[in-house]
Amino acid sequence: MSGSTDPIAPGAVVLRQFVGADDDALLAQIERVQAEAPWRCMVTPGGLLMSVAMTNCGAVGWVSDRRGYRYDPIDPASGRGWPAMPDAFARLARRAAAAAGFAAFEPDACLVNRYEPGTRLSLHQDRDERDFSAPIVSVSLGLPVTFLFGGATRPERAQRVLLFHGDVVVWGGAARLAFHGVAPLKDGQHPKLGRQRVNLTFRKAL
């Protein structure tokens, strides 16, 4: 339902259609970010190439290579700092966190993921941040996708939550370290993004 708040677990909610008319501004800023720090598929510490294309903006960016997962103020592809986080991004992240019950959220990192049909993200925890007291804010744009939201351990059965363009998932508190992922993206055509989904994940990393 448009504008509804759907609980997933204690500390985790989906804010349906929260982006609203701000989507065009977000899409324009995504283009600016990826023009400055182009999409790339990173390598896992085990040497596997990730299928999801990524970039970052903010004070630090999330990176993965043979040395491990970490936040870095420097884009390893360019040797320069990541693009500044657009004001439109930060405002949306703060509003969404507050709507979910997490006041005073100040993100310093935004990971931007681009999914094409067939790409997926396996279950994982967000635990590279220094402080787990801040929530995670995840914005879906483009094709619909099935978001997987599990528990504190990988074997726990994950819920399957269908997300649409403009939906925002926020999780923190008791759910902050929940395993989560994305099922393989089904093919389709979105009127603004075509055959892809773009996801913005905001975190307080430092």
Image (cartoon, helix red, strand yellow):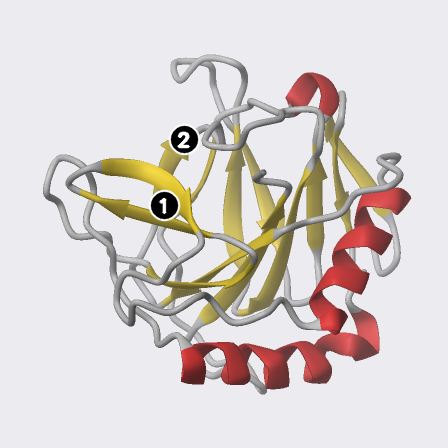
Pick the front one: 148 or 105: 105
Amino acid bearing label 2: His
Q: Position of residue 159 (x, y in %)?
A: 56, 30
Pick the front one: 164 or 179: 179
Total numbered circles: 2
Work out how far the residue at label 1 is from the one at label 2, CA to CA, in angstroms. Answer: 8 Å
Tell me whether circle 1 and circle 2 mark residues in contact (CB < 8 Å): yes
Amino acid bearing label 1: Leu
Question: Alpha-carbon neighbours of circle 1 within 10 Å: few (<14), some, or many (≥20)?
Answer: some
Provide the secondary structure element on which disc 1 rests: strand
Pick the front one: 61 or 186: 61
Residue pictured at 23% horizontal, 52% vertical: 50
Question: Alpha-carbon neighbours of circle 2 within 10 Å: few (<14), some, or many (≥20)?
Answer: some
Q: Position of residue 96 (x, y in %)?
A: 81, 51
Q: Would you identify the image quadrant in which residue 136 lies?
A: top right
Q: Would you identify the image quadrant in which residue 61 lies?
A: bottom left
Which residue is identified by label 2?
Answer: 124
> Can you tell which mark lies on residue 174?
none
Provide the secondary structure element on which disc 2 rests: strand
Residue pictured at 67% horizontal, 76% vertical: 26
Q: Image check: 140 left or right of 13?
A: left
Above or below, comparing residue 4 to residue 58 in the picture: above
> Can you tell which mark lies on residue 121?
1
